[in-house]
Amino acid sequence: MKIHLTSIFVDDQAKALRFYTEILGFVKKHDVPLGEKDRWLTVVSPDEPGGVELLLEPAGHPAVKTYRDALVLDGIPLAQFAVDDVKAEYERLHGLGVRFTQEPSDMGPVTTAVFDDTCGNLIQIATQPQ
């Protein structure tokens, strides 16, 4: 068994696609219309185009707002992405205008940072020493 797909709720799929591809560097994998405004919209890492897909799922369900608002209020990231060098990625993203809620921090064997994805979520990036 392995993880094939995971999802993240987003306020606006078009805005999320721009952020996740143009800022974070993911690549669009699937973009299938579902009704008048929603889409089955996934992105993948350019390093693993056949790897785990991230579904940019519409945040229309009433429970989503309460759930995400509580996570953001408590500073809890909804997802975590691995990067080779958190400090370098922080500098790159900060230079592109990404708002961080936690600057790079050494957390024992892991270095992490947390940013706002502009779509209603906090995302953590992390590097583990090799």
Image: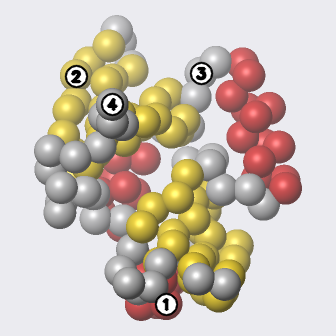
**Crowd band around label 4 with a 10 angstrom C-alpha radius: few (<14), some (14–19), many (20+):** few
**36 or 84, nearer to the observer:** 84
Q: Position of residue 9 (x, y in %)?
A: 54, 35
Above or below — where is 24 with respect to 90? above
- Residue closer to the observer: 18 or 110: 110
Q: CA distance from mark 2 to mark 1?
A: 36 Å
Amino acid beneath label 2: Val
Say whether disc 1 or disc 4 marks the residue closer to the N-terminus. 4
User: Is label 4 in a helix, a strand or a loop?
Assistant: loop
Q: Is residue 93 above or below residue 10?
A: below
**C-alpha span from label 2 to label 4:** 26 Å
111 displayed left or right of 92: right
Mark 3 or mark 4, earlier in chain: 4
In the picture, the quarter occupied by the N terminus is: top left
Q: Which residue is mark 2?
A: 32
* Labels 2, 1: front one: 1
- Choose mark 1 or mark 4, whichever is in front: 4
**Left or right for 82, reference 52:** right
Residue annotated with mark 1: 87
Say which residue label 3 marks.
60
**Tag 2, which secondary structure?**
strand
What is the CA distance from the residue labelled 3 to the residue labelled 2?
A: 18 Å
